[in-house]
Amino acid sequence: MNIEELTPSLATLRAIATAIVILVAGWLASKWAYRIAVKTLSSSHLDQALARFLASMLRYVVLAATFIASMETVGIHTTSLVAVVASAGLAVGLALQGSLSNFASGVLILFFKHFQLGDKIAIGDHRGIVEDIGLFTTTLVSTDNEKIVIPNASVTNGPIVNFSDRGLLRGAVTVNVEGRLRDLGPAMAAMVRAAKRAGGVAQEPAPTVFLTDMEDGSLDLTLTAWYRAVDEDESMHNLRVAVLEELDAAGIKLMNRTQLILHQRSKMPS
């Protein structure tokens, strides 16, 4: 075999080697572009989840450009390749309708911002803190530290309850105490004192006490107070304990049918 016969083979090898270098360099450049984009967008006070999404899109653009450049290097015309990819993309798209739906829903979540990272939300039967908003799934962490991964299409196709959006939630503790009209004032004052010293309970809006029911010799009193959504369990526990302590200190007895009820929460009015 003479040098003339080896020349095309050497040229081909050089082209393949160049294409590999381009691919490796492009892959490294895509990771670098992702990190720089996340840092830049986050410093511009853009929502963190949206910053990650835009950075991911930039990374995919860099990877796509790298792939096209490497194909051109080895002599594959990308015009024909794009036509083939487009045809294959149609078939793949039909087969992956669910995934594409999740992707589209992920874009809607990021741009409409019904919730953000760190918010406490409920989606269907699932409740937890938002840990991640991805292109295809949203991840929650429950109060029991369970990781809940929900397809984005399921997120946007049903009601979303955001407990953190308004800043505070309202909870209530109801007690049934022995007493008549003359005992109403001291009992209400004791419950207000409980709300003022209970840990995690906000003082604005001010806690309130209502007479919600009464029978001969007994009164039903409901204390409403505000707290942060992420502190719900601890705040309501502190509130219940403080109510029992203050009523006991005031000499007010609970009836045998005492109930401590966490009522359905309502968002703080604007």
Image (spheres, rainbow, N blue to C red):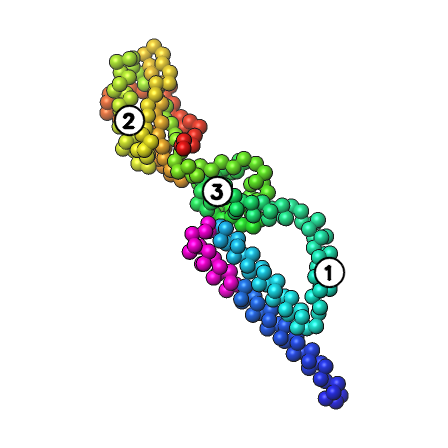
3D distance between C-alphas at marks 1 and 3: 40 Å
Residue type marked 1: Val
| Location of residue 208 (image quadrant) | top left
Circle 3 residue: 115
Which quadrant of the rendered structure holds the N terminus? bottom right
Residue type marked 2: Val
3D distance between C-alphas at marks 2 and 3: 33 Å
Q: Residue at x 52, y 57 (%)?
A: 55
Q: Nearer the viewer, residue 161 or 191?
A: 161
Question: Which tag, 1 or 3, sits closer to the chain's start?
Answer: 1
**Mark 2 crowd level (few <14, some 14–19, many ≥20, 10 Å Cα):** many
**Residue 228, horizontal then vertical, whole percent:** 38, 37
Q: Residue 192 has which mark?
A: 2
Q: Is residue 181 left or right of residue 15?
A: left
Q: Residue at x 73, y 56 (%)?
A: 87
Assess whether mark 3 and mark 2 are in contact (beta carbons under 8 angstroms): no
Circle 1 residue: 84
Of badges 1 and 2, the one in the foreground is 1
Question: Which tag, 1 or 2, sits closer to the chain's start?
Answer: 1
Write the start and end of the magenta stretch as one range. Answer: 31-48
